[in-house]
Amino acid sequence: MTPMNAVTVSGLRRAFGSHVVLDRLDLTIADSEFVALVGRSGGGKTTLLRTLAGLDPVAEGSVEVPALRSVVFQEPRLLPWRRVWQNVSLGLPRSRRRDEATRALAEVGLADHAQAWPLTLSGGEAQRVALARALVREPELLLLDEPFGALDALTRIHMHALVRQLHERHRPAVLLVTHDVDEALELADRVIVLRDGRLDEEIETRELFDDRRDPRFEQARARLLGLLGVTDTHVADPTPTTDPTPTAAPGQPLTAP
Amino acid sequence: MGDPAAMAAVTQPGSAPAEGAPAGSPRAAAGTTAAARGRRVTFSAGGAGRRWRLRVPSLVRRAVVPILLIALWQVGSSASWWSTEVLPAPWDVAHEFVTLCNNGQLPSNLWVSVRRALTGAAIGIALGLALGVAVGLWRPVEEALDATLQMLRTIPFLVVLPLFILWFGVDETPKILIITIGTALPMYINTMSGVRTVDPRLLEMGRQFGLNRLQLIATVVLPGAMPSILTGVRYSLGLSWLALVVAEQINAQKGLGLLIYNAQSLFQTKILMVVVVVYAALGLITDVIVRLAEHRLLSWRSR
């Protein structure tokens, strides 16, 4: 059997006034494929994700997505007046709510927080609840909109491992929007760059590495950063440049502007 | 830091707290004055003032002033600072209260009035809530209704009572109606503003996770607006007693209004005082009920 595509986007165009955000964009995501989308901020990454989620309208072009989709937003977006497990089971059929919420919370390591109020959770815990809420309905497409952006570096590392593990187990197709190149390389099977409203470059990372010391990792990283307008990532430039773009030593998290 | 202007700005206000706050006490402002440099402060558990507060329950501390006032009232009456015909002593008022209870006058009339107020308030609160949600959520409804309702709000609602009598006669209808109007408007205003403050991102999330319109209102909109809604309920119930007093001035066959009317014409100040105290108690009871509801419905806020 040939692999099906979870997502098929063709000729998608979106403009805000005269500013074209998505310019006749084509994209396919295979079943169970983990795709990371990187790009400058304001470059239309979130617009594309929201369109796939069905939150933004399709004005031009066509978008085909599975009916079963879930989103993890930048913020956890938990209802503070519902207990954690009730947040996870939001919108599920009444009979299955309790069991499935408990199971999903166990998967993200928060089984003992089921009865807690969301306001008592830390940022990382709240985002894990949001992840459980997204996965509990076994989506065929999981949309992650910079879900770790607001978390501290240590928590983010834990979240990466968790997301990887959950993707292994549930195998949804994933679109991860991020501005963190390292995050994209670490998690995704394929990294795509959105530039000027189009998909500019693709990097297959599936077979590439599990090891950061692999020279191909550095190559891919340098190329991605180059595409995002960050140059010279290997050698720290001693002379201050007029370009405010951040540079960092290899292996350190580096975010695109 | 070497900037002399900045230094001056830091040191100048520092001279003030030195007088008020005791040196070294945890309450002393964490200043940056030259005098504070090198000094140490200690934060430790259980200061003297704190222990005193724990020993005396809050309820007792709150009751001190009312009890003093009643004592003063009793002393003044006993010492004949004023005629008891004008202001009877608290003891006599209490006595009258018992008499009215025993002969059944107070319970039966009180029940009639409470039922009136609660009927009017229930209709008004339901109406205000529904309007507030509809106007808060849907633009076309807002455009159709908000201006009118805001205009009605500026009318002191009691002023329409004579009109209501002309239109609806002197039976129950105008009485209930005036209470309904008095309670619906504050309920509307508070509900609407509460609904407006609901985080749109939560609404979007709810839609994304498959909630339909009714489920969204029940799980996102109403709980999100609940703090405002409860403020509205408290206002409304308070106003319902006020509206009741005025409404019962029309042709009071039964109710606290009748008690007032009779007592007034016979110059029975003791009965008038009993009714005043009963009104105070009703107001207090409704307030306690709303507070309890708040405690329960908003428990998610206090971690």
Image (cartoon, rainbow, N blue to C red):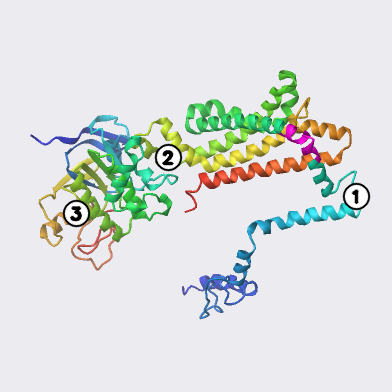
One can see residue B33 in this view: yes
Query: Residue B4: percent from the left, percent from the top?
Result: 51, 74
- Which chain is home to disc 2? B
Where disc 3 sits, the SS reads: helix
One can see residue A192 in this view: no
Q: Nearer the viewer, residue B48 or A35?
A: B48
Residue furthest to the front in view is: B102
Q: Which residues are magenta?
A: B99-110
Where disc 1 sits, the SS reads: loop
Residue at label 1? B82
Query: Residue B280: percent from the left, percent from the top?
Result: 72, 43
Q: Main secondary structure of the magenta part?
A: helix
B75 relative position to A35: left or right: right
- Give the CA distance from mark 1 to mark 3: 88 Å
Where residue B129 is drawn, which disc sits there? none
Which amino acid does the dot numbered 3 rest on? Glu
Residue A35 shown in magenta:
no
Position of A246 relative to A44 (above/below): below
Residue at label 3? A186
Give the crowd class for mark 2: few <14, some 14-19, many >=20 residues within 10 Å: few
- Give the CA distance from mark 2 to mark 1: 61 Å
